[in-house]
Image (tube, coloured by chain):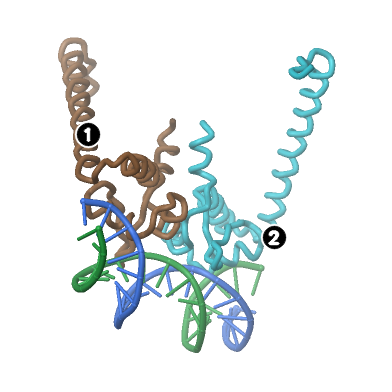
Chain colours: A brown, B cyan, C blue, D green
Amino acid sequence: MSAKDESYKHKKVISIGTVSEITGLTERQIRYYEERKLIFPERTQKGTRKYSFNDIEQLMEIVEKMEDGVQTFEIRQEMLKKEKKIDEKKIRDEMIRGQLNARFGVHKSP
Amino acid sequence: MSAKDESYKHKKVISIGTVSEITGLTERQIRYYEERKLIFPERTQKGTRKYSFNDIEQLMEIVEKMEDGVQTFEIRQEMLKKEKKIDEKKIRDEMIRGQLNARFGVHKSP
DNA sequence: CGTGTAAGGAATTCTGACACG
DNA sequence: CGTGTAAGGAATTCTGACACG
């Protein structure tokens, strides 16, 4: 996926009414999941929430988990675990990259 | 590009205020370009316009052409020409496919 | 805990029109 | 032709709170 496609997915441009239509959730529910830190819309200057397609996908996953009786608190914990794993992978990758550079790296500026 | 990425690009979910922010155009301008048939937003049930990322890109191109002194009428004509070319290619492709099928095609149902 | 709802206000969007040029 | 603007109305969104359970 190119960087451009990524920007489509992550750019926060969709207002809550549209998100409600797409996901089938009420605005109340969508705001509540934000309160529980499951999604993180941006705000315009005057305070209206803006969501990305990625947020919508996240909401779809939340819906499924809620239907399985999972509580928002647990969903949040799962999210934090996943983030942690990703961060750890990043650190590992950077370490490998750093060591390769230290031994075989090309130094561009003199 | 996968079908999913395509849907991000073409799904009409962005309201005019956001489009205005992103493109730098006034709402007046955006509505006018619609009147001139340069863009085709969808409408919600209650009549508010919804744009896609593709529409935004289209608007960016319009901006450049307008800066070059091209009139909306001419921009529309260019668009129609391009569409025509695409349609012609589609027909050619389908004819080739059809002929291949007629001679060597596999018939799935007996 | 998760969600519905009524309340009041602020911001958004829409249309049709007049204006300038 | 392309765009600005004031006008009036309708639809959207926001917050904080009460309710149920």
* B44 relative to A107 in the view: left or right: right
Judging depth in this view, the residue of A57 and C16 nearest the camera is: A57
* Relative height, residue A31 to residue A66 (above, below): below
Quarter assignment of residue B108? top right
Question: On the rendered structure, is A28 left or right of A22?
Answer: left
Q: Position of residue B104 (x, y in %)?
A: 80, 13
> Quadrant location of the N terminus of chain A?
top left
- Estimate the spatial distance between the alpha carbons at disc 2 and disc 1, rounded to whole Å: 51 Å
Residue in the picture at 73% in, 46% down: B81
Q: Which residue is mark 1?
A: A83
Pointer 2 and pointer 1: residues touching (CB < 8 Å)? no
D9 vs A76: above or below: below
x, y (%) of residue D1?
A: 66, 68
Q: Quadrant of residue A90?
A: top left
Image position, residue B103 (x, y; %): 84, 14
Whole-percent x, y for residue A42 in the image: 30, 54
* Chain letter behind tag 2: B
Tell whether B79 sits left or right of A101: right
Q: Nearer the viewer, residue A26 or D13?
A: A26
State the residue position of label 2.
B73
Q: Which mark is residue A36?
A: none
Chain bearing mark 1: A
Q: What crowding class fits label 2: few (fewer than 14 Cα within 10 Å), some (14-19), or many (20 or more)?
A: few
- At horizontal 54% and vertical 34% (from top left) the residue drawn is B3
Frontmost of labels 2 and 1 is: 1
* Up-down relation of residue D14 to residue B68 (above or below): below
Say what secondary structure mark 1 lies in: helix
Mark 2: secondary structure: helix
Which residue type carries mark 1? Glu
